[in-house]
Image (spheres, rainbow, N blue to C red):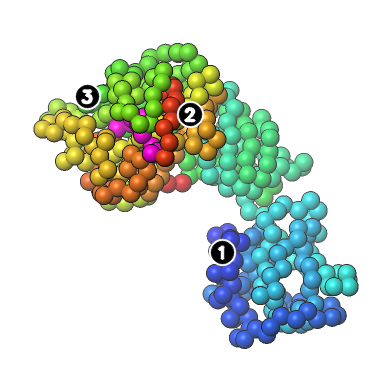
């Protein structure tokens, strides 16, 4: 039985239960607590489409319906040692709709415990299933062997008898794990992990595989090492002025060449020094610089652009923190700008086109990666801003993916922000959403 058939969000509980309660009780009575003890006859899934499925087990965070007698006597309810939310709006004499807690039990007894007002406990045999690990992101998808990365997701359970571990492409096992929580853990990339592909994580409850790729080359636009036949971009700021071929102050190369936006000081109110903090790719189909959507071929379907994410790696040393001004990521159409008959930078300051504004400093006032390369993911569905975070006149469309510009510029009109800029960028790519 597939996990996603039963795994329901507690946040959506009220929406799900509106239908489920109707099937449990046509007209639920006003809640009044009763004496005595509850009797559970059976348990079923709460959703209407699964109402005829009696169950003896369900996954964490699933919404289930207890059916029995005198259920209004329940004052507290536990699954193993995890207390569930008791919502009297969904509790009647004969039905009780409840969400199984999402916490991992310290002690697994495979029982439901129902406590009445007098403190008497009634038990019912029921097994809470823990899903296999789910991987949502990795701190650096291009980490080298020997480097430590953080894997994020859910259900990372480390059992003393079945330790948690990761497996890299090529069936390379990584057992040097640390700082394990339910939602993340650190792992050392094994020495012989040199292939592209999915990462899997194995716990006592099974093995989950990532949709993201380690050493991801899918939809690669710019790696500054010759991918797509391009060493740099194309346009007035092709990237030649910001291209780096080796280590610089606080930054070691990720994977060959990279670009570095470097400006001692700039504000969000001024037009930027484009030579120092930007690069362009403006196509020219007559001289070997195709539109990006053509360049990517089968790796990208512009008619379904909402299904993709822009990814790249960044490195910012802690000695040069980023404290203001946004990184604008701007896709452009051929009509908007090209090197054949319409070279222009007017779109950068325009409020017509859509863009993403990456401002990780806005949460805490400062951002750096500690000199370590970090993967950035921006879904194309988030390309919904102007330079000052307003709503653009023209949204993204299938025609938008002809050119690309990265530029540190603007981001906010609420206050004037000043920052040094020292941002290394590599491996810009468009990949399917996770």
**Residue 107 percent location from the top left of the image:** 81, 53
Write the residue at 21% across / 26% down: 235
Residue 122 appears in the figure:
no
Q: Left or right: where does residue 184 sit relative to residue 221?
A: right
Q: Is residue 193 above or below residue 15?
A: above
Q: Nearer the viewer, mark 2 or mark 3?
A: 2
Q: Quadrant of residue 91?
A: bottom right
Q: Which residue is mark 3?
A: 236
Q: How busy is the neighbourhood of tag 1: few (under 14 within 10 Å), some, or many (20 plus)?
A: few
Q: Secondary structure at mark 2?
A: loop
Q: Which residue is mark 2?
A: 323
**Residue 321 percent location from the top left of the image:** 50, 24
Q: Is residue 305 above or below residue 223?
A: below
Write the residue at 76% across / 53% down: 105
Q: Mark 1 to mark 3: distance in Å?
A: 50 Å
Write the residue at 58% across / 31% down: 149
């Amino acid at each position: 039985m597939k996990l996603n058939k039963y795994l329901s969000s507690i946040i959506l509980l009220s929406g799900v239960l509106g239908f489920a309660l109707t099937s449990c009780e046509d007209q639920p009575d006003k809640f009044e607590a009763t004496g005595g003890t509850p009797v559970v006859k059976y348990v079923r899934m709460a959703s209407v489409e699964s109402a005829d499925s009696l169950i003896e087990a369900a996954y964490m965070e699933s919404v289930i319906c207890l059916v029995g007698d005198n259920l209004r006597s329940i004052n507290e309810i536990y699954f193993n040692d995890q207390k569930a939310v008791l919502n009297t709006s969904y509790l009647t004499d004969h039905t009780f709709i409840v969400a199984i807690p999402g916490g991992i039990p310290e002690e697994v007894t495979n029982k439901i415990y129902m406590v009445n007002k007098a403190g008497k406990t009634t038990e019912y045999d029921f097994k809470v299933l823990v899903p296999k690990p789910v991987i949502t992101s990795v701190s650096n998808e291009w980490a080298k062997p020997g480097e430590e990365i953080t894997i994020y997701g859910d259900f990372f359970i480390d059992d003393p008898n079945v330790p948690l571990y990761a497996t890299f492409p090529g069936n390379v096992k990584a057992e040097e794990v640390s700082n394990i929580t339910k939602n993340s853990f650190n792992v050392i990339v094994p020495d012989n992990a040199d292939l592209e592909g999915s990462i899997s994580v194995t716990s006592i409850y099974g093995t989950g595989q990532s949709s993201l790729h380690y050493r991801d080359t899918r939809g690669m636009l710019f790696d500054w090492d010759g991918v797509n036949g391009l060493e740099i971009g194309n346009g007035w700021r092709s990237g030649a002025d910001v291209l780096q071929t080796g280590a610089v102050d606080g930054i070691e190369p990720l994977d060959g060449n990279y670009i570095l936006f470097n400006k001692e000081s700039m504000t969000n109110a001024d037009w930027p020094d484009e030579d120092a903090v930007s690069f362009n790719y403006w196509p020219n189909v007559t001289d070997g610089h195709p539109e990006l959507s053509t360049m990517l071929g089968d790796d990208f379907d512009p008619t379904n652009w909402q299904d993709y994410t822009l990814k790249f790696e960044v490195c910012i040393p802690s000695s040069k923190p980023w404290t203001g001004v946004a990184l604008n990521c701007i896709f452009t159409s051929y009509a908007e700008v090209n090197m054949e008959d319409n070279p222009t930078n007017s779109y950068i300051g325009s409020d017509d086109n859509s863009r993403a504004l990456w401002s990780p400093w806005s949460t805490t006032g400062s951002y750096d990666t500690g000199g370590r390369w970090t993967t950035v993911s921006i879904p194309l569905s988030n390309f919904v801003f102007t330079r000052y975070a307003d709503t653009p006149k023209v949204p993204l469309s299938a025609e938008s993916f002809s050119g690309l510009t990265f530029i540190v510029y603007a981001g906010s009109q609420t206050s004037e922000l000043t920052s040094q800029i020292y941002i290394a960028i590599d491996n810009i790519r468009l990949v399917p959403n996770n």
